[in-house]
């Protein structure tokens, strides 16, 4: 598949999603703006961006363009989003998990010599307190080039039996005819995409439990400058929800248009040469004009794709603890694997800004811990971890992070090694936090024991629930740190362009 298309799709799907239930007791408002906007001389450029609230309800959200110290230069031809005054946008209140789409316009004065390359700040405040600040660079282009855009798609809610059409609109706001265009439809693999057309190919991938499905369609016709297009109603692309999709959760989807090189388009056509059936086609909503300029890379690749979220309702996922037995004589080093399994019937929701699945491990007495899993930290809960001394092995209590969402029937285990000492070896335990999906607490705890000899065998059992691991305000404050630290230990995946 075209590397540029795949790269953009993967980047979009990697953006944070979140569960529908939020325990964060404070708002977290962030701006998602392009780093740089390229404007063709003599033309206006509409720039879209998103405002996200990943925390609790936010009051009096205000987005401001420019500052007193660095105002937006008048010769940039800046026009604020609709409803804003003097570069100040009063968005009012934002609910937990809400996303707002905003757009502003730039049309630099082509006679100016001071705005060839500049930038201006954009900030967001919540009830007067700063929440996020970023900067947008502006570059003028005298020659121009390709500039494809994908219109915004609204966030939606879908049941496990429902589906929707992906009715995206596409524009060529550059000044170059684009002949070789691939449309990209991508989503996390809890969602399904149907586009069974001769000129489309479907691929899927799964890396560390986070999967995605991609559909790439090579258009037969190009896009003229100034043209506006949409997927034809005769060849719809539909989005649905997998029967085992975990919820409540908001899954990410992407729709985009990518200009391909002639070489990439030729290779694509070779791959679909033997395919049969109808072609996915576009409907022209607004005619463009014809020009003859050398093809070049897209001036503003950030707006080639449009991100949207699909809210999936709550499902059941029975998380059961997995215990173990340390075996050996006094002085021996023994290793075990403990953790959790998902008995279904659906997957467990992925890690998010509002919740992460954890397994609490209490080591039996009279053992000296010698090694723990990379995904575990000392403490009784996320609230109780000493992050300044997170390598300590002196205690009996540890918290393990289930970084990868468990599919139905999936299992996640963590390794522990310990020296067996002389003593009574009071039993420890393993407790899994199954979150809001887990309606069966009877198997949330399993024993972790010591078998010091063949005559003293003690098998792990499933006992009475010990309660779920507390995840209060303090835990969620450090949740991002934990996830980042754990993710750094995982293999880094690079997509070559």
Image: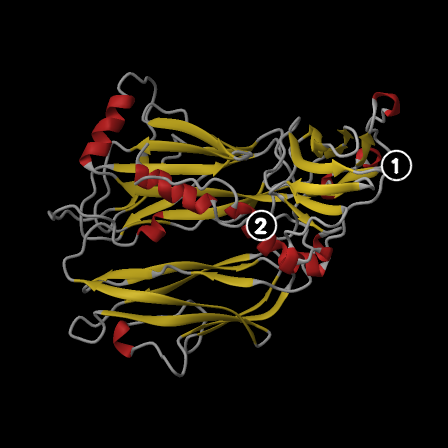
List the residue tagged with mark 1.
464
List the residue tagged with mark 2.
483
Q: Which percent across, then down, holds residue 291? A: 13, 48
Q: Residues within 10 Å of mark 1 (few under 14, many from 20)?
A: few
Residue at the spot 64% in from the left edge and 54% down from the top edge:
390
Q: Look at the picture and state if 134 lies above or below 351.
A: below
Q: Which percent across, then down, holds residue 116? A: 21, 69
Q: Secondary structure at mark 2?
A: helix
Q: Is residue 283 visible?
A: no
Farthest residue, direction front: 331
Residue at the spot 42% in from the left edge and 51% down from the top edge:
152
Q: Is residue 160 left or right of residue 121?
A: right
Residue at the spot 24% in from the left edge and 51% down from the top edge:
226
Lower sequence index among marks 2 and 1: 1
**Quadrant position of residue 202:** top left
For marks 2 and 1, give the CA distance.
30 Å
Q: Secondary structure at mark 1?
A: loop
Q: Is residue 43 left or right of residue 421?
A: left
């Amino acid at each position: 598949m075209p590397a540029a298309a795949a790269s953009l799709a993967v980047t979009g799907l990697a953006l944070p999603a979140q569960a529908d239930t939020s325990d964060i007791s404070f708002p977290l408002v962030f701006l998602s703006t392009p780093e740089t906007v390229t404007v063709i001389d003599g033309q206006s450029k509409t720039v879209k961006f998103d405002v996200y609230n990943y925390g609790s309800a936010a009051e009096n959200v205000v987005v401001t363009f420019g500052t007193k110290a660095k105002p937006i230069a008048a010769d940039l031809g800046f026009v604020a989003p609709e409803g804003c005054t003097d570069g100040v946008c009063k968005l009012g209140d934002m609910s937990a998990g809400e996303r707002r789409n905003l757009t502003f316009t730039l049309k630099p004065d082509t006679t100016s010599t001071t705005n060839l390359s500049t930038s201006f700040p954009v900030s967001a405040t919540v009830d007067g307190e700063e929440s996020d600040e970023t900067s947008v660079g502006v570059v003028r282009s005298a020659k121009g080039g390709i500039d494809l855009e994908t219109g915004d798609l609204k966030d939606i809610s879908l049941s496990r039996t429902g589906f929707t059409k992906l009715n995206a609109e596409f524009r060529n706001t550059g000044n170059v005819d684009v002949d070789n265009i691939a449309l990209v439809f991508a989503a996390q693999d809890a969602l399904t995409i149907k586009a069974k057309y001769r000129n489309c190919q479907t691929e899927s991938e799964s890396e560390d439990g986070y999967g995605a499905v991609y559909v790439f369609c090579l258009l037969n016709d190009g896009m003229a400058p100034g043209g506006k297009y949409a997927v034809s109603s005769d060849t719809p692309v539909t989005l649905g929800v997998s029967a085992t999709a975990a919820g409540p959760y908001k899954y990410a989807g992407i729709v985009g248009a990518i200009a391909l090189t002639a070489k990439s388009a030729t290779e694509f056509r070779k791959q679909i040469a033997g395919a049969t059936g109808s072609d996915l086609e576009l409907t022209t909503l607004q005619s463009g004009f014809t020009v003859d300029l050398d093809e070049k890379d897209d001036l503003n690749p950030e707006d080639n794709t449009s991100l949207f979220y699909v809210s999936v309702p709550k499902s059941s996922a029975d998380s059961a603890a997995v215990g173990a037995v340390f075996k050996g004589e006094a002085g021996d080093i023994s290793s075990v694997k403990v953790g959790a399994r998902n008995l279904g019937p659906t997957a467990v929701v992925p890690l998010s800004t509002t919740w992460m699945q954890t397994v609490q491990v209490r080591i039996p007495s009279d053992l000296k811990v010698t090694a723990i899993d990379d995904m575990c930290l000392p403490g009784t809960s996320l609230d109780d971890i000493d992050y300044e001394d997170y390598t300590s092995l002196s205690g009996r209590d540890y918290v393990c992070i289930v970084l990868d969402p468990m599919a139905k029937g999936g299992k996640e285990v963590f390794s522990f090694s310990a020296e067996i000492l002389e003593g009574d070896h009071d039993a420890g335990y393993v407790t899994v936090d199954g979150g809001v999906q887990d309606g069966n607490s009877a198997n949330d705890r399993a024993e972790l024991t010591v078998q010091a000899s063949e005559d003293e065998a003690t098998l792990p059992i499933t006992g009475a629930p010990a309660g779920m691991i507390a995840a209060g305000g303090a835990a969620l404050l450090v949740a991002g740190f934990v996830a980042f630290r754990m993710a750094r230990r995982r293999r880094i995946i690079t997509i070559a362009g």
